[in-house]
Image (tube, coloured by chain):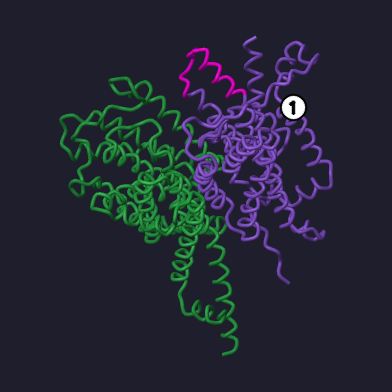
Amino acid sequence: MNNLVNMLFDKLGKGYINILTTLLSIFLGLFVSGLLMLLLGHDPIESYMLIIEFAFLDSYNIANIFTKAAPLILTALAFGFAFQAKLFNIGGQGQFYIGTMAAVFVALFMENVPMLLALLLPLLASIVAGGAWASLIGYFKARFNANEFLISMMSTYVAIAIMDYLLRVPLQEAKGEYPQTDVIPQVAQMPKLIANTPLHYGFLISLAAALIAYIILWHTRLGFHIRAVGQNRDAARFAGIDQKKIFVIVFMICGIFAGLAGFMQVTGVQYRAIQGFQPNIGAAGIGVAILGHANPFGIVIASILFSTIEVGGLMLTQTSTLPSSIIYVMQGLVVIFVVISYFVRSKILTAKQKRELARGEEA
Amino acid sequence: MTILLILSRALHMSTPLILGSIAEVYSEKTGVMNIAIEGVFLVGAWGGFIGAYTYESILVGFIFAFLCGIIIGLIYGLITIKFKQHQIVTGVALNFLLAGLTVYLFRVVFGIRTSPARISTLSRIIIPGLSRIPIIGPILFTQNIMTYLVLLFVPLAYWVLFKTRVGLIIRSTGSNPEAVEAAGISVEKVRYSTIIVTSGITAVAGSFYVLGFLGMFTQDIIGGRGWIAFAICFLGNWHPIGALFGALAFGLADGLSVYFQTAGIQVIPNEFLIAIPYIFTIVATIARRRFNVPAYLGVPYVKEQN
């Protein structure tokens, strides 16, 4: 049996082993979640069937999966892109809020302008604000060798405070009832990709962002430098790569991604900014990035998986006594098993290499 | 009078931060950052509530919290120390899971309720005599039992870390693991046992928000305070006394913001008062020139193969 497994692994390439171990960890995550469903007297198999049935119930729900995946792809890229340089951007949530506020601020002024401009200006605002906000983290890292993990973490709480203030005083709705802005003018609302569904053009922006991240990382000089810094800081420095510049640029790009997510939630979904909305988008993005191995295409697929669980899961929890927290349990367990699978994978690859070496010696 | 009240509250609010950040100092001294700290705080609050509510005893609450923390420490240690996976990735993933899992399991235990389950919190113990000392008395000697114990814990933590053999082993494990291994002590064992015990202590710190403060469990009860304890470990330069002062500073900021809010005094917008501790952390992280970072912090130990 063991030999058979070994033979199978020897036949498979590294990419297939990645996919295989990831699929296995998704299965294990959902399996353990199923056991937890039993605690509340729910049949896991029935529940999963319902989740799938609800998620693909009609065109509205299917479109909703992609609508939810759109900002998730971007906040996941905000973590995953930095991870390629072994930098830790835990501040995606804050960058998302900064992008949100910049986009809504500009969008609110968009009266009597052509639609293209009414969408383009808030988009630019979110990019500039998110990018500038996050590049500060990179700058602190570059200039003061500050711990980027800690600073990006703290920056989210500062961003939340800024957002709360803006929504309580200067940008609060005219009615003055809730901490939210007025609805943005119709002309600044993103058109739907498919009529009568929530799916807006933002999903295409997210796909483009993932493609751009891939091209930057693997087909440009900058990307080569970013990955070199990620693999070995010392070697990169000796090769003459300006690490400090890379730190700032990487964080700026991450901030642009997360800021864009804010733009599309404002102009594509909510049509206004609301205090504390989407409070888990940053953390979920990190989970998605881990699940997608910090690879832009992996991130797109992982986002769609997360959103499918969410759309199907939400409908299941609304129609049964299962609480909605089961959705986050499923997502969380999947992510934990993926982290463990990194270990299993490296074991498999080392063993495989050893066997190859051994065979080489025999020959 | 008001100032005394603010300072007394500051000490109260800094209690869990002192305990949690010193636990973090210990685990980081062995080379393991406990990135799961936010989740461990939350699990502590969760377990603390369930223990205290079920057995109608705050002491059982603390014990439950400790046990829950140990379980998370075991898992975190297994993945980061045995499996040698990245500490930040593992910790962030665990926090993500625990945020959902605590809420789900809370529902499993308590079902759907019309009003939230509550417990009575630790009462203040006013120490006769000492509490009459001007200024110091009302601040220091009118706290609850946990604050007293935590204040006694600080010198103990200092003493163990710097004056005992156990402390020496812990410090060496983070600064020179090869030497520890050469002395016949397993680096993995030191790291594993430290992360397990400190996770238990961290969870007790988290349980304070339920048992000593709010009297109920909510999903956002911790709301980033675990991260604050994590930051205090850095700001306190990996030293228990430094952690004490760092935690007191955060407690003071907390006390002030609550005072300004309740008194309706509007010097600067409240949101900025709330943001001060976080801005302070960022500024302090940038401004510090010299850090006592354990040399092997965050680096998994791979034994030389002979």
Quadrant in the picture for residue B183: bottom right
- Residue drawn at (34%, 49%) of the image: A311
Q: Is residue B289 visible?
A: no
Q: Quadrant of the C terminus of chain B?
A: bottom right
Viewer-proximal residue, B134 or B218? B218
**Figure disc tally:** 1
Q: Identity of the amino acid at label 1?
A: Tyr
Name the spot of residue A221 as percent of width and height, x first.
40, 58
Viewer-proximal residue, B15 or A84? B15
- Residue drawn at (50%, 76%) of the image: A9
Is residue A272 magenta-colored?
no
Colour green maps to chain: A
Colour purple maps to chain: B
Residue at the extreme right: B164
Say which element carries label 1.
helix
Viewer-proximal residue, A87 or A140? A87
Quadrant in the picture for residue A346: bottom right
Q: Is residue B141 above or below residue A101?
A: above
- Residue drawn at (49%, 14%) of the image: B267
Please tell me whether the stretch drawn in magenta is mainly helix, strand or loop: helix
Name the spot of residue A164 as percent of width and height, x first.
41, 27
Query: Over which residues does the magenta segment extend?
Result: B252-271
Quadrant in the picture for residue A52: bottom left
Name the spot of residue A108 as percent of width and height, x first.
25, 29
